[in-house]
Amino acid sequence: MTSTLSETDRLASEPAFQQVSTRRKAKNALATVLVWLSFLVAVAPLVWVLYTVIVNGIKRIPFTNWWTQDFGSVLSDEVGGGVMHAIIGTLEQCLMCAVIAVPLGLLVAIYLVEYGRNGRLAKITTFMVDILSGVPSIVAALFIYALWITTLGLPRSGFAVSLALVLLMIPVVVRSAEEMLRIVPDDLREASYALGVPKWKTIMKIVLPTALSGIISGVMMALARVMGETAPLLVLVGYSAYVNWDLFNNNQASLPLLMNTERATNSMEPGSVGFDRIWGAALTLVIIIALINLIATVVSRLVAPKKK
């Protein structure tokens, strides 16, 4: 009993916090410096790219007709016109891609997390998703060309581009949605099952609403990735200087395709028409992607579970 009391008195008399050694302080300072250097190395190229795009593209953006006209009424080397035809084409193709890819990717993610788990089919599906995530965009474009145009005999169109973008978007949606579903606590599922709620209704009413905020962010990330793809556009649709609202027929422009066409047909000397159009289109694409991500951030916060 005496020894127990003496041990307790000894522990109580010791300081709560021991003095941090100089060696540990040096290691902590070194790690902090390395983390900050890594951060700067990662951010510097991004800042440089944004600065270059803004400085070179802002010369075209202030034009009032940049957002409301196309290039059909001006010559290829004539100042004027706008990129409305390319903006419409980009938004239509990516929206159609999202309409197809998001439900498919979300259903695959739900199966892998909620039903498949460690089943054989789930392993095969995961393996195929991993392969699809590494497929180059030109391969996806050639596959759609062989299937949609060569085999089925259908015309080149913006919809064919959307199909190729679906192949590139699905694995990103699956992976992001899968991770968001996995971080939903199992306690929520078990509580719902204990109340007699069926599994499908638990997924719809409990799991998906809880993970919806992260799923939306993942979808926007996938959409931003496919929005700048060029290879499917070069293979599956021709460029048009006029506005084309029909996604299934005739040539249709988009911002990446416009930039490639201007590079091929006009001079790239600084100050030339082609140079200004390319950088203006690049800045327009950056602005659209930034707006989409901003909207996604706002929506994610609105649908996120509220803390009570």
Image: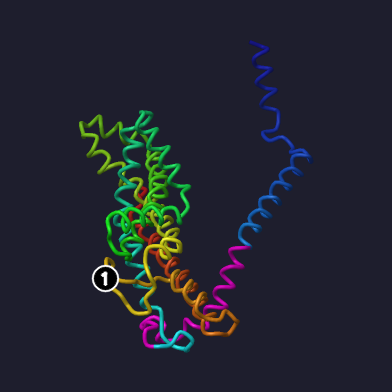
Q: Nearer the viewer, residue 238 or 226?
A: 238
Q: Is residue 16 above or below residue 7?
A: below
Q: How is the image coloured?
A: rainbow
Judging by the rendered image, the residue that carries numbered circle 1 is 246
Q: Nearer the viewer, residue 131 or 61?
A: 131
Q: Residue at x 40, y 44 (%)?
A: 180
Q: Is residue 97 above or below residue 170?
A: below
Q: How many marks?
A: 1
Label 1 secondary element:
loop
Q: Quadrant of residue 91?
A: bottom left
User: Quick one: label 1, few (<14), some, or many (20+) residues within 10 Å?
Assistant: some
Q: Nearer the viewer, residue 147 or 226?
A: 147
Q: What segment is highlighted magenta in the picture?
A: 45-73
Find residue 213 and report its horizontal and vertical position in percent: 37, 52
Q: Nearer the viewer, residue 164 or 18?
A: 164
Q: Is residue 65 above or below residue 229?
A: below
In the rendered structure, the answer to whether residue 246 lies left or right of residue 292 reads: left
Q: Quadrant of residue 39?
A: bottom right
Name the kind of residue labelled 1 in the image.
Asp
Which quadrant holds the N terminus? Answer: top right
Q: Is residue 255 above or below residue 304?
A: below
Q: Residue at x 45, y 70 (%)?
A: 285
Q: Is residue 143 magenta?
A: no
Q: Residue at x 34, y 60 (%)?
A: 162
Q: Is residue 55 magenta?
A: yes
Find residue 148 and report its horizontal and vertical position in percent: 31, 56
Q: Quadrant of residue 292?
A: bottom left
Q: Residue at x 55, y 73 (%)?
A: 53
- From this viewpoint, which residue is outermost toward the top? 1
Find residue 125 and report its horizontal and vertical position in percent: 37, 37
